[in-house]
Image: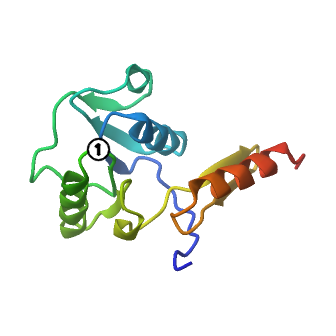
Amino acid sequence: MDKFPLFIDLRGRRALVFGGGAVALRRAAVLVQYGAAVTVVASEPLPELERLPVTLERRPYRPGEIEKAFLVVAATDDLPLNAQITREARLNGAWANNASDHNDCDFFFPAVVRRENLSIGITGTGENHRQVRDAAEKIRRIEL
């Protein structure tokens, strides 16, 4: 495990999410919960993305468009495109997360457990998402 658990203030920080499927939806929803200014770029976004307080751009990724972003999530169904997006993100000084390749991530999305005065993030190596999800569910059942 080589990822350092870091809790950061995302309020007002620009986050770009590329992709319009279930993974993009989950990641955009978490970023919104923590106050990020989220833009989702997707040719065919899930209808649920329209209900999130995000800027939704119905179009494909365009090379050269990642500028002044703090976080970038590549969650398309095109693996080479995800790698291209994360490369561009890093060239522009943004933290990158490639949803299709845990080895191409500057940060992982944790399973999040939120309570009134607590925010708990749980992550693993990126290889066993079920284990992380199950651990989060067990913590959610604990009365804190």
Q: Nearer the viewer, residue 6 or 111?
A: 111
Residue 33 image point, x, y percent: 54, 40
Residue 90 image point, x, y percent: 24, 68
Three-letter residue code for mark 1:
Thr
Based on the displayed image, in which of its 4 quarters is residue 106 positioned?
A: bottom left
Which quadrant: the N terminus? bottom right
Horizontally, is 64 left or right of 139 in the view? left
Which coloring applies here? rainbow
Q: Nearer the viewer, residue 80 or 70?
A: 80
Q: Residues within 10 Å of mark 1 (few under 14, many from 20)?
A: many
The residue shown at (70%, 48%) is: 113
Based on the displayed image, in which of its 4 quarters is residue 115 positioned?
A: top right
126 up-or-down from 32: above or below: below
The residue shown at (51%, 64%) is: 126
Residue 6 image point, x, y percent: 56, 68
Residue occupied by mark 1: 76
57 up-or-down from 23: above or below: above
